Image: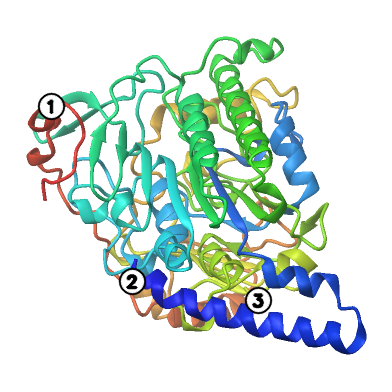
Amino acid sequence: MEERTVTRPRRNVAAAQLALVVGLCIALCGHCDSSLAAAGQAQPPNILFIVADDLGWNDVGWHGSEIHTPNLDALAMSGVRLDHSYVQPICSPTRSSIMSGKFVSHTGIQSLILSPKPCGLPTNITTIAQQLKQRGYATHAVGKWHQGYCKPAYTPSHRGFDTFFGYYSGAEEYFSHYRKDHAGKLTWNALDFHFDTPENYTNVRNMNGTYSANAFTDQAIKVMDEHDKTKPLYIYLPFQSVHSPMEVPPQYPAKYPKINDQNRKTFAGMVSALDEAVGNVTSAWKRNGLYNNSVIVFTTDNGGLVRSGGNNYPLRGQKFTLWEGGTRGVAFVSGPLLNKTGYIYPGLVHAVDWYPTLVELAGGDVSSLDVDGYPMWSHFSNNQTSPRTRFPYIIHNETQTFVIRVGNWKLMLGVKNTSQGGWFPPPGTPSVDSSVEQLREHSINHLHPEEGDYKYDQEQYSDAVQGKPKPELLYLFNLEDDPTEHTDLSQSNPQQVSVMMGHLKEMLQPYAPDLCIHVKGSPKSDPINFDNAYSTGWC
């Protein structure tokens, strides 16, 4: 409350000054620019920030997928499609970038925050929700958290959100909202569904049988219906969909009689349920009078996972990998405040850019932010050149893995060419020969859910920084000419490798050590200690 008290006089002074200008304009000339007058009464825009889980490049209609996404298509096509939007290859890191505006090498969240582990997004980081709350926003989180929960300070209601309705961990059952887990020799199957405020933590036990996409939709609509419309609203809506397990009401996969592969069919149904949920949420957004002064953001957290029915074709790779299929995410921004719409933004965007972009929209001073992102709103809205020219996909000292992009160039150090880094057309594609199908099966059967391409030889980094990278662990791609990463240029273009190595050395520091990779699960997290529910307060 104190932070709000500080900021309100500044806005009121600004409003008074603007009103004086408008009044003088009217007095002197009898009329004034209506948009200027309107600006004197406008509050910061409402923000609806939607995150899909494990949605692949080839899983949405506007990319030509066989999966139907009419609601998402309408928002994307009427807004700005961000076809060069980059995320991390797994869940927790991407969410930490959105929450903090920092690259994962600066937060220490390079790895998954697994449920029994006592780690989380560092509490000395001011989240985007805290920034918006300081600017008078009502802030609500609905859905998946996955940023740590072992102590209250890690949980959403202590990271700037007025309320949180959802689950703390990375995955759970869609209908029962239970999650199976283990720490050491202990195993359990417990509830992970909560309604939290800064004062109270409540386990939600009356939603058994309610599909999570519907539960989250209903809660988001409830937030809108009860919202005080004199304040701007920020809803962070990270759906569970379409992460495994493969669960969905039967009417949704029934829409795809031509898809014979059962995983892909079920997955397609899950995407349709997600699309329907987004349609219901945005309809309520409009019905509540929130749309006309609003921005809607949609992004996936990483690429699709082949073994769970996701697809990123023609991009290479999948979730857990550092190829484009794992990191080039489906995204768009939509809403009536955009000046130019209906086009594909050609510039680079990274998950860290959302933080300063939202602060900018809220009227904040982005120059004072301690973030790695750029404010992108004017660039999206007016199709201006992106200020982003480079970024790290990953800088991970613990596994000696380094992947960066500079302009159109991508350098990969320490990434082995495993089966997870192949090209996977949708199952049943007529042009797919038996060798590709075998590769798909190998990927499905051999991908470790926590490893992906994050397990590397430990000695190659010392050679790499001395200019002697091992050929089999070094790749160079020109993504403008070769967006599907078929042609490695590292041997034919050593000069560009040298240039990229110079950029890499600049990005190596500062470095925040991985906070979770070597942390063991704690038996103290056992839900049996908390009435068989995942709970905070054990670290």
In front of the other: label 2 or label 3?
A: 2
Q: Where is residue 184 in the image (x, y as percent from the top left)?
A: 10, 36
Which residue is under mark 2? 2
> In whole angstroms, how far apart are the C-alphas of marks 2 and 3?
35 Å
Residue kind at label 3, given as amino acid type: Pro
Residue kind at label 2, given as amino acid type: Glu
Q: How crowded is mark 1: few (under 14 residues within 10 Å), some or many (20 or more)?
A: few
Residue drawn at 46 percent across, 76 percent down: 7
In front of the other: label 2 or label 1?
A: 2
Which residue is under mark 1? 531
Residue kind at label 1, given as amino acid type: Asp
Q: Can residue 54 be seen in this view?
A: no
Determine the secondary structure under disc 3: loop
Quadrant location, the N terminus = bottom left
In front of the other: label 1 or label 3?
A: 1
User: Is tag 1's residue or tag 3's residue first in the polypeptide sequence?
Assistant: 3
